[in-house]
Amino acid sequence: MYTSTILTLALAALTTALPTQKRQADDKYYGVSLYAHNTFTSGQEYTSPIPIEINKLTQTTNMSTFKLSFDKGVHINVDINAIECRAYKDAAGVVPGSAPFTVDSPALLSTPGNPVVVNSILCYVTETE
């Protein structure tokens, strides 16, 4: 009886683990890289990269920026022309901080030297032709 209980538990554990391992092997990362634009006190502009996973709200923790744009050279497993993003003022992604923006149309949040705070960003795939 003791042996059969151990055998049953071992088989149950193996059966449960196999689908999880297969699912993880099939998972792919889908993402883009955005730039947060800001200015030094001297007025010179600089950018900071922000990796964004598609369909996942990414928290940016009080990031100050006046413009968000795509890094056109960095996109993983997605057509960058089919991606749209939106910035949010809060970490939960409830209070919009920008209109939707794309690779061809960056988010202009304010004027240079007057950054606004962005706490999260969501990027997603739009319909393609």
Image (cartoon, grey):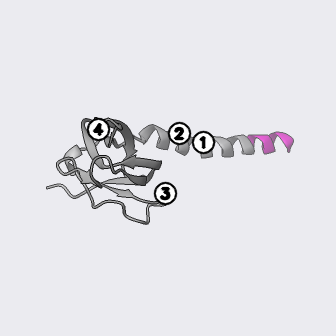
Residue 38 image offset from top left, x and y in percent: 33, 42
Alpha carbon distance from label 1 to label 4: 56 Å
Q: Residue furthest front?
A: 42
Return the residue nearer the eye: 38 or 113: 113
CA–CA distance in space, label 2 to label 1: 6 Å
Q: Amino acid at mark 2?
A: Gln
If you read the primary sequence from the N terminus, does the residue marked by circle 1 or circle 4 appear first?
Answer: 1
Contact (Cβ within 8 Å) of mark 2 with mark 1: yes
Q: CA distance from mark 1 to mark 3?
A: 34 Å
Residue, disc 2:
21
Question: Counting residues from the N terminus, which is met first, the one under dot 4 or under dot 3?
Answer: 4
Region of the chain picked out in magenta, as a range: 1-7
Mark 1 vs 3, N-terminal side:
1
Residue designated by label 1? 17
Kindly state the secondary structure of the residue where label 2 is placed: helix
Q: Earlier in the sequence, mark 3 or mark 2?
A: 2
Circle 4 packing at 10 Å, graded few (<14), some (14-19), many (20+), is: few
